[in-house]
Image: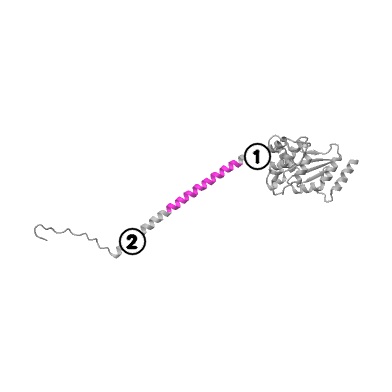
Amino acid sequence: MDLGPGRRAAPPRFVPACVSEKNHHDGKRAARERLAVEREKQKAAERRRRTLIVGASVVCVLGLAAVIGVVAANAGKEKSSGSSGPVAAPSGAQGKDSLAIPVGQESAKSTLTVWEDFRCPACKAFEAAYRPTIHELTDAGQLKVEYHLATLIDGNMGGSGSRKAANAAACAQDAGKFTAYHDVLYENQPSETQDAYADNAKLIELAGKVDGLDTPEFRACVEQGTHDSWVVKSNEAFKAGQFGGTPTVLLDGKNIYQDRTMTPQKLKEMVQEAAKG
């Protein structure tokens, strides 16, 4: 349209296209679908991330378990090698493989063989009932006692108190103090479920109750487990003997602990009768 000289028509204004209602809803739906797809992608990525974390954790746990297994195996080998070393019998030990600790005179007519475990409550009960009579008979030269040390409770309850107490008793034998220390161990026996004798410090503390026993030599013997291999061998002999348990008490080869009629007085009479003949 002609506006006259010097005048131009204004440029047409941009008018956005009108969008129908249907297309508007379609656009919203498409947007929601795109958002849903994006969320699903994020969820899938999160699941993959968790899977990788769990997988890595399992690998770490399995690796740690393998390391622990190797360490435990090596520890077991070290323990085994320590128990299977040269057998150092205590001073004066007698009998087959020097597994018996003798108390009393060699000339005694009767021999009492005792298989015992310092953690065993029944052994303590036997000691409490029969100890005065046994001491009386050994002091009179009428009875010889051969003590064999076992580690039955260690095997049944776990721990190492039976073995360590037996080693300490063997160390006391080296010092000529076996009987006194033997009695102290039973007098202070811990509960069967408590492995107090696994602590060398406790065994050394109890040695203070025996005059002249707590010496550097005794301490070293206890702490180094000098007689551990001997104790292990003694326990193997106990198992090979197929005894019912501890204590096992034999008078001249006859099991008197199983005799329900046995009493300290009856034992005394039997030993004194044998001494006459």
Residue at 73 percent of width and 40 percent of height: 168
Q: Is residue 24 visible?
A: yes
Residue 227 in percent (x, y) is at: 72, 37
**In the rendered image, which quarter contains the C terminus?**
top right
Residue 276 in percent (x, y) is at: 91, 41
Q: Are marks 1 and 2 in contact (CB under 8 Å)?
A: no
The region drawn magenta spans 44-72
Residue farthest to the right? 276
Task: Give the residue number, with chain letter if any, for mark 2.
Answer: 28
Look at the numbered disc 2 and give the secondary structure of its residue: helix
Q: Nearer the viewer, residue 211 or 81?
A: 211
Residue at 64 percent of width and 38 percent of height: 78
Look at the numbered disc 1 and give the secondary structure of its residue: helix
Q: Position of 141 compared to 165: left or right? A: right
Mark 2 residue type:
Lys
Residue at 34 percent of width and 59 percent of height: 31
Identify the mark at residue 247; answer none if there is no mark: none
Q: Position of 50 compared to 8: left or right? A: right
Task: Give the residue number, with chain letter if any, for mark 1.
Answer: 79
How far apart are the two marked residues, 1 and 2, measured between alpha carbons?
A: 75 Å
Magenta: main secondary structure equals helix
Q: Is residue 234 visible?
A: no
Q: Is residue 47 magenta?
A: yes
* Crowding at mark 1 (Cα within 10 Å: few <14, some 14-19, many 20+): few
* Crowding at mark 2 (Cα within 10 Å: few <14, some 14-19, many 20+): few
**In the rendered image, which quarter contains the N terminus?**
bottom left
Mark 1 residue type:
Lys
Q: Is residue 106 magenta?
A: no
Residue 36 in percent (x, y) is at: 38, 58
Residue 51 in percent (x, y) is at: 47, 50
